[in-house]
Image (cartoon, rainbow, N blue to C red):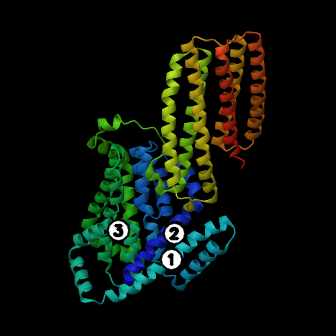
Amino acid sequence: MELFGGLAIFVYGVHVLSEGLEKVAGGKLMTMLDKSLNHPLKQGLFGTIATALMQSSGLLMVTMIGLINANLLNLEQAIGIMLGQEIGTTITGQMVSFQIKGFNLVFLILGFFMMYFSSNRKLRMVGQPFFGFGIVFVGMSMMSSAGGVISKTPFFQQALAALSQHILLGVLVGAVFTAAIQSSTAMTGLVIAMGKSDSISLAVAVAIILGANIGSCIMGWLAAMQSGTHAKRASYAQIFINVIGVLIFLPFILPFTDLVAHTSAILARQIANAHTIFNVIVSLIMLPFVKPLARTIENLIPEKEDDKGKKVHTRFIDPRLINMPMMAVKLAMEEVLRMGWQTYEMLERSGEAMLKHDEDAVKWVFKHEKNIDEICHSLESFLESIPGEKLSPEDQDKLEDMKHLITDIERIGDHANNLSEFARQLYHKKVNISKAGQKELQVLFKKVLQNYKITLKALKTRDEKMVEKITSIEEEIDDLEKTYKLNHIERLKKNICHPEADTIFVESLRNLERISDHAYNIALTLIY
């Protein structure tokens, strides 16, 4: 009970630590991702750091499958990140293998007071990794204490003797147990805790850790089974890397164990060092073969016709990205911007439909209005599923902003659709707007498009200085709408405008002015 209770506390501590690290350093990690996709060494560095922050190679693998499904990673880049991921998984083991005795309680107490008694949001955020770090060591202490008692039981001693004689059995135990709990970090922590109580031999510990590397593939494999060909390729690439790595080391496991024994006098440190050395060597061996491996996997698993024909409304979001909340926020913003530029094009086409009598433009707008609705619904669901409590204060604000942004952008799409409907009515009724009215609509269309374009650019760059310019153009558009309505009334009195065009002209002005209002609302999120 104490052993598995300690394991539960350890896993929870890793979870709290991971959340805290993501909040503190997640933004920098996302910036690093953008810059790391052009070289295997950079990809490996990103994989190492991301795994160290997430404290789980399995969760990073699931997140990568989400990125692959969103077409933000190709197989070659994913393999480069996987090699770094193998190294990143060793950091937790190194951390918990040190004998810091009662000092772990300092982290626990410090983190607790920062999290629960500080009124500063940033200080609470920084306190979480400290708190998680302390919990991890409490769990390790419990597992180590229990391991000392369990090691004296006849059953455990017989099992240890069997594993010592049959190394492959140790590998199998490590693989099966890791697959069952879906955490190589927990498996490694458990083995190191047993090492701290001297209740396991180094050879058996190394065999179990080698097996844990294979068992860690289970999360990625399960996620890939529900995805397309590209995700399956990434999953099989991870399995191939880990299995080949273990097969390379298996014939030399006893000489390797003897070598590792010289790295420290403490068994727990020897186990952690074995884990690190194994993963670093495997990653270095595989690094020159990233491209050939990617080509081989692609040939073995060809793309299915079903995958090619799939219609996907969203590009940047995938439910698996929720595993890394700060990444989910960043990519959701990319999808919001993409949605914004699609509605901008809808507005352009609606102008062509009305001013150039382009019936093809009308059909194009109607078709894309349905796409915008689909994107909006997908985004709403995605944003609601992002756990806000796991985000930094800045990302929490962005998350709330986006929930309002998509409403404004979707309404702009609706207004563009209305304008195209007005254009179609003009064709069917064979009614023309007067030349003066057409010129006024042309001016207003141009102003509204200009303001919306500036708004989207400001949203992408988070440029608060542009809000003043957007506000100025918005006021100008309000004045133009009022002026053009009065002009239209005068033209009706003089019989210059066709009476049947009256409602369409006035409603077109109103829709354009409302689009400008929504653009202004979007801009306000930059300063409020």
Residue 497 locus on image (x, y percent): 70, 12
Instruction: Say which residue appears at 72% left-offset and 44% top-offset.
Output: 464
Q: Do the CB atoms of the residues marked 2 and 1 lie less than 8 Å apart?
A: yes
Find disc 3 in the rendering and name its residue. 181
* CA distance separating discs 2 and 3: 18 Å
Closer to the chain start, of discs 2 and 1, is 2
Amino acid type of disc 1? Ile
Find disc 1 in the rendering and name its residue. 135
Residue 341 drawn above or below residue 16: above
Mark number, residue 388? none
Find disc 2 in the rendering and name its residue. 16
Closer to the chain start, of discs 2 and 3, is 2
Q: Quadrant of the N terminus?
A: bottom left
* CA distance separating discs 2 and 1: 8 Å
Q: What crowding class fits label 2: few (fewer than 14 Cα within 10 Å), some (14-19), or many (20 or more)? A: many
Q: Do the CB atoms of the residues marked 1 and 3 lie less than 8 Å apart?
A: no
